[in-house]
Image: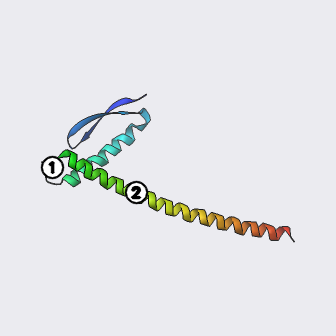
Amino acid sequence: MSEPVAVRILDREFTVGCEPGERDSLMAAAQLLDARMREIRGGNKTAALERVAVLVALNLAHELQALQANGGTRDDAIGRALVDMNRKLDGLFDSLASR
């Protein structure tokens, strides 16, 4: 069951629903978001919260896409290596069986 959790982002408090086992993860995400928003806002305390939030969301989405693309490339390489190893093992077993 979801429980309300208060987080602070750019000195504003937001209450969000969270599963009990995910509270620590939510708090860490809120701290990351707060840090990124402060970084984008910089010294401009009058920057519109909506604009800062959109820029941070865009940056985080870009980072996620890059991580997913790198993970896909890595997964493909691992898959090819496994196929190659299986082929070599099949050849080894075939040669042992024919002896």
The residue lying at 24 percent from left, 50 percent from top is: 37
Q: Position of residue 97 (x, y in %)?
A: 84, 67
Badge 1 element: loop
Q: Position of residue 52 (x, y in %)?
A: 22, 50
Q: Is residue 22 visible?
A: yes
Callout 1–callout 2 Cβ contact below 8 Å = no
Please give the label number shown on residue 15.
none
Residue 12 found in image quarter: top left
Residue carrying label 1: 47
Q: Is residue 67 above or below residue 5?
A: below
Q: Is residue 36 visible?
A: no
Would residue 45 appear left or right of 29 to someone viewing this image? left
* Amino acid at circle 2: Gln
- Quadrant location, the C terminus: bottom right
Q: Residues within 10 Å of mark 1 (few under 14, many from 20)?
A: few
Viewer-proximal residue among 7 and 66? 66
Q: Residues within 10 Å of mark 2 (few under 14, many from 20)?
A: few
The residue lying at 40 percent from left, 57 percent from top is: 65
Q: Earlier in the sequence, mark 1 or mark 2?
A: 1
Please give the label number shown on residue 65.
2
Would residue 53 appear left or right of 82 to someone viewing this image? left
Would residue 56 appear left or right of 88 to someone viewing this image? left
Residue 8 found in image quarter: top left
Badge 2 element: helix
Q: Position of residue 84 (x, y in %)?
A: 65, 68
Q: Is residue 90 above or below residue 65?
A: below
* Amino acid at circle 1: Ala
Viewer-proximal residue among 66 and 18? 66
The residue lying at 43 percent from left, 28 percent from top is: 1
The residue lying at 30 percent from left, 50 percent from top is: 57
Q: Position of residue 89 (x, y in %)?
A: 73, 66
